[in-house]
Image (spheres, helix red, strand yellow):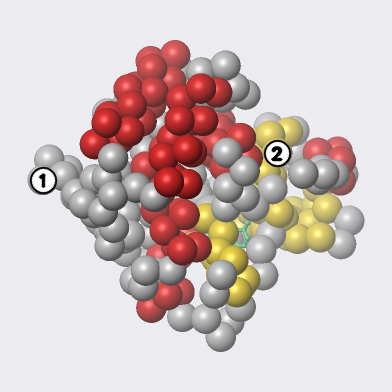
Amino acid sequence: MVSDSTWLTSGEITVIGRIADASNATLLAEIADSKVVYKPVAGERPLWDFPDGNLASREYAAYHVSEMLGLGVVPRTVFRDGPYGSGIVQEWIEEDPEIDIVELAQTDSDSIRKIAFYDLLINNGDRKFGHLLAVSPDHIYAIDHGVTFNSENKLRTVLWQWAGKEFSEIERDLLKKFLEIFESSDVNGLITDREIEATISRVSNLQDADTFPYPSPDWPAVPWPPF
Ligand SMILES: Nc1ncnc2c1ncn2[C@@H]1O[C@H](COP(=O)(O)OP(=O)(O)O)[C@@H](O)[C@H]1O
Ligand SMILES: [Mg+2]
């Protein structure tokens, strides 16, 4: 895939404002005439269950997973310096305002299933409806991956409709590929070695089970609020 990220990596960032409902310092910004999201590490609120590293590094690692498997579910993301220090900068996605994402996300749409599958790999603890951006019914982006890769199982999502369903051939191939390449990939240095090992062990277990997991009774399986 040829994707020129030069403008995103090195263009000057002009901050326009803070995204009101965001829990951390999530900023709306512009590079040239393009809207971007800028999340500086310095604006993060610490989370009690994520002692190591920062949310931006996790978000960047999650982007790598989407790219390394060719899923393309996460908008283009870079880790770089900016007016409030280093953080992630992500392309802004214009959603189709006609699409009801809450309704669409509860169907058996393949584009939603791709994101539900992706969340298993990154151990996503925060898959809300509001973290799904639909540009069309068949093209949905996934955002906000700061709460991911915990070494404990933390899967918390609104997308449970495939629980207990067998993986498809494509998903089986993706699990295999993930296990072949994850350890030596660009995620090195972004999350801890322990989290890398825990991720590999979790994905191996998924491969053995050959099905999407059921919600665990041991932790809240649906984020609150769900949007
Ligand atoms: N790449 C993006 N494109 C379009 N809208 C976005 C993008 N990233 C974030 N947003 C909007 O900003 C809101 C807050 O962003 P989010 O990543 O959830 O931040 P936080 O980590 O603070 O919760 C999202 O719910 C969404 O409405
Ligand atoms: Mg959010």
Q: Residue at x 48, y 38 (%)?
A: 174
| Residue 24 screen position, x and y as percent | 49, 48
Per the image, label 2 sits on a secondary structure element best described as strand
Report, in whole angstroms, how far the alpha carbon at label 2 lies from the one at label 1: 36 Å
Q: Is residue 63 above or below residue 21?
A: above
Q: Residue at x 59, y 66 (%)?
A: 139
Q: Return the residue nearer the eye: 134 or 223.
A: 134
Residue that mark 1 sits on: 217
Q: Is residue 29 left or right of residue 51?
A: right
One can see residue 222 in this view: yes
State the residue lying farthest toward the bottom.
Answer: 98
Q: Return the residue nearer the eye: 29 or 130.
A: 130
What kind of residue is marked 2?
A: Val
| Residue 92 screen position, x and y as percent | 69, 59
State the residue lying farthest toward the left.
Answer: 217
Q: Is residue 190 above or below residue 30?
A: above
What kind of residue is marked 1?
A: Pro
| Residue 181 screen position, x and y as percent | 55, 23
Q: Is residue 178 left or right of residue 87?
A: left
One can see residue 224 in this view: no
Task: Name the quadrant of the C terminus.
Answer: bottom left
State the residue lying farthest toward the front.
Answer: 169
Q: Which mark is residue 65?
A: none
Task: Name the quadrant of the N terminus.
Answer: top right
Residue that mark 2 sits on: 78
Dot in front, 2 or 1? 1
Label 2 Cα neighbours within 10 Å, binned few <14 / some 14-19 / many ≥20: many
